[in-house]
Amino acid sequence: MNRLNSRVAVITGGAQGIGAATALRLATEGAHVAILDLNGERAAATAEQISQTDAVVAAGGSASGLVCDVTDEDRVADAFQQVFETGGRLDILVNNAGITRDNLLFKMGRADWDSVLVTNLTSAFLCAQAAQKFMVPARYGRIVSLSSRSALGNRGQANYAAAKAGIQGLTATLALELGPFNITVNAVAPGYIATAMTAATAERVGRTAEEHQKATADRTPLGRVGAPEEVAAAIAFFASDDSSYVSGQTLYINGGAR
Ligand code: NDP
């Protein structure tokens, strides 16, 4: 399926986890993907691996890695300019970069509140602003952001839940503002996906990744946790023209849990 032939996509935090799986998926559908990540070496290595994947080569897709702290407005502007100059267009933005700094309210320091809000929410605002500069004149764009099931409330995640609920409000609002320019804006809200982020959470609560995953799987209708590729598949739908009349939506990807 080459739904993204010749499209140019930016994926933030794409060096690993859900972002890397999404970069691979979009490139497999023919897109040229720029991975923006704090860790430039890992971004370049992931991009190299993706570019050499047989399915990506067959689809005519590619990937490149760029170091970029997406909380830094100037770095974001520079990176988007570079992607546009290299690719000649900018069609797709996936706001994926995110962090957790979990703690109960009475123990959560101001620094952990601020860093989670800035990395998960302000970065999406900055990147959407940088992307629309190229999307509006082209009268085309697809913006997909990572919310989370935690947006509905999750003990120990006041900062993260607030940021991810904020993503849903940002998404609904940008869909209104950018719709007249043929730009769709949607979000995905995954439940438990097995990545370095959830492995770190397991360690923090004194469990192995397997024990932690099993506890979540036991209360999930599908009886398991999710894989990054399953989130990437939904993002690819929102990034493609198969979702051309879908905007302002948040799709929960959580194995049927309520
Ligand atoms: P990972 O921690 O595996 O990957 C996140 C990536 O984002 C890392 O490569 C990280 O780089 C990068 N990153 C962090 N801060 C910045 C920054 N300021 N600028 C650029 N890149 C940055 O996370 P996941 O793959 O698990 O999660 C991806 C997204 O999905 C996040 O937004 C997360 O909140 C969301 N999500 C994840 C769920 C899950 O269960 N895993 C569930 C719901 C939502 P580095 O490692 O160098 O810091």
Image: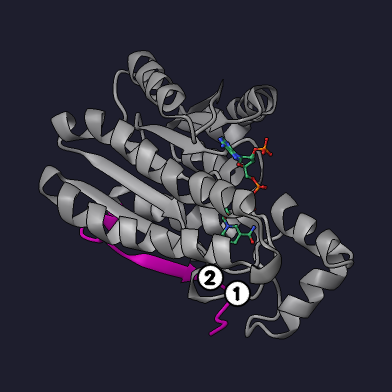
Residue 229 visible somewhere in the drawing: yes
Discs 2, 1 touching: Cβ within 8 Å: yes
Give the image location of residue 18, x and y in percent: 60, 49
Q: Residues within 10 Å of mark 2 (few under 14, many from 20)?
A: many
Colour scheme in the image? one colour
Residue 244 counted in the magenta span: yes
Tell me which numbered mark, 2 or 1, is placed earlier along the sequence: 2
| Front position in the image: 199 or 123 | 123
Q: Main secondary structure of the magenta part?
A: loop
Distance of label 2 from label 1 (alpha carbons): 8 Å
For residue 74, above or below residue 158 = above
Residue pictured at 73% horizontal, 78% vertical: 217
- State whether label 2 is within 8 Å of ligand 1: yes
Q: Residues within 10 Å of mark 1 (few under 14, many from 20)?
A: some
Q: Tell me the number on the disc at residue 36.
A: none
Q: Is residue 200 left or right of residue 15?
A: right
What range is drawn magenta here? 242-258
SS for callout 2 = helix
Question: Of the residues shown, which amino acid type is indicated by label 2?
Answer: Arg
Q: Tell me the number on the disc at residue 154.
A: 1
| Front position in the image: 22 or 151 | 151
Residue pictured at 45% horizontal, 61% vertical: 188
Residue 10 counted in the magenta span: no
For residue 98, above or below residue 79 = below
Give the image location of residue 67, x and y in percent: 57, 23
Q: Is residue 185 left or right of residue 34?
A: left
Question: Of the residues shown, which amino acid type is indicated by label 1?
Answer: Asn
Give the image location of residue 191, x and y in percent: 59, 69
Q: Tell me the number on the disc at residue 149.
A: 2
